[in-house]
Image (cartoon, rainbow, N blue to C red):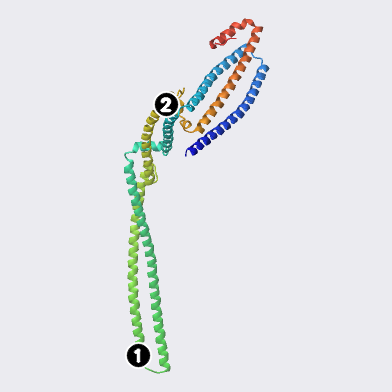
Amino acid sequence: MAIIDRMKKRFRKVKKTKEAEIVREAEEELLEDEQEIFAEKQEYVRKKIKQRELTLEDYCDQLIDSQRRLDQKKLEYEQVTAYLTDIQLIDQMTQEEKENVEAVAFKLATLNVDREELKQENRALTQLQFRFMQLHEHEVPEGISHIEEQEQYQSAITGDLQKLEEERVNLKYEERFYLEKLHNLKMITFSSLFIAVIAAGITGFLYTQYIFDILFVMLIILFLLAVAGTVIFLKYRNVNYALAYCRKQQKRAVQLLNKVKIKRVNNQATLDYLYSKYNVGSARELTLLWQQYQNILENEEKYKRSSKELTHYGNLLVKQLQKAGVHDADIWISQPEALLDSREMVEVTHSLNVRRQKLREDMEFDEDVMDLAVSGIREHLQKEPEKAVVVQQLLEPYQIRI
């Protein structure tokens, strides 16, 4: 195990060394490119200044502006240098100090992530929706219940309408069936009479050709005709009765259908009013908005608690870093990830080095411009020495001496 631990430590050390070499090579390439650009910039400014015929006041203004910029950049340069020194001090802390700092930094990083998530959740509602919920928060639960009841009632009415419509359609088909049956019975009646007449005619014809007693035959025909007529009459009466009952049921179904339609229209008007009042399209949508509003209120409480914790751990981190001699410990409250991840710290260091190099180049450029301005002022004073007092008055407030 000890061998494995040593191998892991050696591997991490080699990895850090390689990362440092890569960063150093990148910084060197970047510095070379920036130096070339800076040299070209300086040469361009020199040419421009030489091409222009500046007055004594122009040179003084140029000197004052350059001095002001140089002073600001010097302060910023010192600040960046102090940040880099702080990073060195952090890197030189003891193992125990590092563990304590990392524990607090982890708390801060976790709190920052949680707070960002809370902010994202609080954006679920628009400002208008949140304001509406605030104004009607005592009415919304009852409103949700009321809308749900009306929606359930509307659903029940719609179901009744569908059933009544199906019943009406079925009764319509049943009416057609009975009408068709009546028509068929009429056709059977006419067919039976026609057959009876044909049979009687045939019997009469046979009697004229072959004289025999036709009374028995006629009685049979009349009997059959009477039986058929009775059956047809009974069937016709039953079908007619069924048809009348079907039409009565159909009329009743239409009346119920109209009543239910009126109920649906009235209930829909109530629902439309409730939807308009709460600016939603359903009870489900209002429930979702209400839940989001409740979550926002809960998140605001969590955010307040996390703010107190953030202040507590921020102060604790500052104290621990100050014990290690860190000059500006407050800035690490906003970037605790760099204290936890060496790659983040390398990026911060690289960014500060690039920034410091850029400041150094800008300061050299301002100094060069100041030298050119001083040379221009001296040339003017050699030609017009009587203006030395004017130059002194212009530059004295800025503590610049020629």
| Quadrant position of residue 362 | top right
Q: Is residue 3 above or below residue 321?
A: below
Q: Is residue 30 above or below residue 193?
A: above
* Marker disc for residue 216: 1
Q: How busy is the neighbourhood of tag 1: few (under 14 within 10 Å), some, or many (20 plus)?
A: few
At 59% from the left and 6% from the top, the residue drawn is: 389
Q: In this view, does 102 lie above or below 165?
A: above
Q: Compare residues 287 and 195 and report the one nearer the observer.
A: 287
At 42% from the left and 91% from the top, the residue drawn is: 206
The location of residue 255, given as percent across then percent down, is 33, 58
**Callout 1, which amino acid?**
Phe
* Marker disc for residue 175: none
- Disc 2 marks which residue? 320
**Callout 2, which amino acid?**
Gln
Discs 1/2, front: 2
Query: In the rendered image, which quarter contains the C terminus?
Result: top right
Element on which disc 1 rests: helix
The location of residue 9, given as percent across then percent down, is 50, 35
Report the label total: 2
| Quadrant position of residue 51 | top right
The location of residue 162, given as percent across then percent down, is 37, 58
| Quadrant position of residue 166 | bottom left
Element on which disc 2 rests: helix
Residue reaching furthest to the bottom = 211
Q: Compare residues 259 and 290 and report the one nearer the observer.
A: 290
| Left or right relative to 74: residue 162 | left
The location of residue 358, given as percent across then percent down, is 58, 24
Asked whether disc 1 touches disc 2, contact meaning CB atoms under 8 Å apart, the reply is no
Q: Is residue 256 above or below residue 351?
A: below
Q: Compare residues 274 and 13 and report the one nearer the observer.
A: 13
- For marks 1 and 2 on the same chain, the one whose residue lies earlier in the sequence: 1
Q: Distance between the residues labelled 1 and 2?
A: 135 Å
